[in-house]
Amino acid sequence: MTKDDMIAFNRRITESNPTQLICVFFDMYFAYEKDALTALEQGQQEEYIYATRHCSQVVEHLRSVLDFNYEISKELFSLYTFVEERLAKAMYLRKPKEFAEAAKVMQSLQEAFEKVAQGDGRKPLMENTQQVTVGLTYGRNQLNESVAKDIGTRGYWA
């Protein structure tokens, strides 16, 4: 994952409500999966292990935030455990087949969460974040971003 990708994910996280945040995690998973498969094709073992571990960490986070007061959480727990097992197997076998099995589950879950997120009108989890405006300004064929200057009331109050 490039630095620009990380910045984009950071921005999305700051602008997301709880359901949208789950969707961001799925996007992060697939970005790391792509990195892992590319590294595997190119024979870059360290990068492959790094990206695969990050995939696993994303899934572990999704599993750790489940609220077991809801019945569906038990099903999601089982699915996330299955995905983690496939990732562990992919780590030591170094075969894309294991990623394909995990991806099938993760894609189905991602589609479901994206449908739920469309109907979720809650406010973003983070308030008082930096305002970013994106548009075609001063550049005829390029997209420019403008970041509002920090205001004194941003951040934590002591």
Image: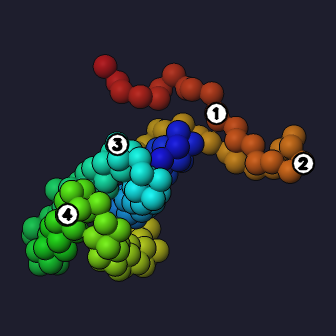
Q: Which mark is residue 106?
A: none
Looking at marks 4 and 1 on the same chain, the residue that comes earlier in the sequence is marked by 4
Q: Nearer the viewer, mark 3 or mark 2?
A: 3
Which residue, given by chain and number where applicable, does mark 1 sit on?
Answer: 148
Closer to the camera in the image, 27 or 91: 91
Looking at marks 3 and 2 on the same chain, the residue that comes earlier in the sequence is marked by 3
Which residue, given by chain and number where applicable, does mark 4 sit on?
Answer: 89
Seen in the picture, residue 35 relative to 148 is either above or below; the reply is below
What separation in Å lies between label 4 and label 1 (alpha carbons)?
Answer: 46 Å
Element assignment for label 1: loop
What separation in Å lies between label 2 and label 4 (alpha carbons)?
Answer: 49 Å
Marks 2,4: beta carbons within 8 A: no
Element assignment for label 2: loop
The residue sitting at the right extreme is 140
Residue 54 placed where, x, y %? 31, 49
Residue 70 placed where, x, y %? 13, 74
